[in-house]
Image (cartoon, helix red, strand yellow):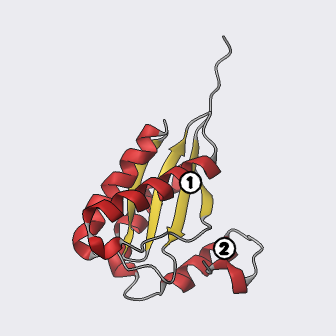
Amino acid sequence: MPQSLCKIHLHIIFHTKTTSPMIKEEHLKRLHQYIGQLIKVSGCDVICVGGTGDHVHSLVMLNNTETVAHLVEEMKRNSSRWLKTISSAYEGFAWQGGYAALSVSQSQIDTVIAYIENQTEHHKKQSFRDEYLQFLQLYKINYDERYVLSD
């Protein structure tokens, strides 16, 4: 049987809908752990999950059969359902419709891990909107600013 060899690291970013409640500080760690479990269940390797009350960053090593779209759909759909079970405060919770999935070279893995782990401090200096647009510009992704952060 032929062997499929691949090692694709992705930095996946998505945020809450603008009408959605913020994720409370006391629930963030559990949410990040839950999303990590969802990544593992998909057959991919979770390297790091973090973020703040309005968005999530994850560093994932994609397996050789999973698609990015399916992985993100599962992460968002199941974590949204789970949040609604832990508190009535999340009754109207939803993630945005889109996401960013950015390639990460092997030499940048430690830098991305540190970046994800330092989100709270990072966002004291830069808004999520500015961060997201900066990533899109850095990766030369064409986008329409009217829609990129909309629900």
For image coordinates 60% across by 77% down, the residue present is 151
Viewer-closest of 31 and 51: 31
Q: Is residue 46 above or below residue 114?
A: above
Kind of residue indicated by mark 1? Glu
Q: Is residue 64 above or below residue 112?
A: above
Question: To which residue does mark 2 refer?
Answer: 136
SS of the residue at dot 2?
A: helix
Q: Quadrant of the N terminus?
A: top right
Viewer-closest of 10 and 100: 100
Determine which of the numbered discs, if any, sits on residue 73 in the image: 1
Give percent across and percent down for residue 123: 40, 83
Evaluate if marks 1 and 2 touch, with contact meaning CB atoms under 8 Å apart: no
Kind of residue indicated by mark 2? Leu
SS of the residue at dot 1?
A: helix
Q: Is residue 12 left or right of residue 67?
A: left
Give percent across and percent down for residue 113: 41, 59
Residue 100 picture quarter: bottom right
For image coordinates 54% across by 80% down, the residue present is 131
Residue extending furthest toward the left: 26
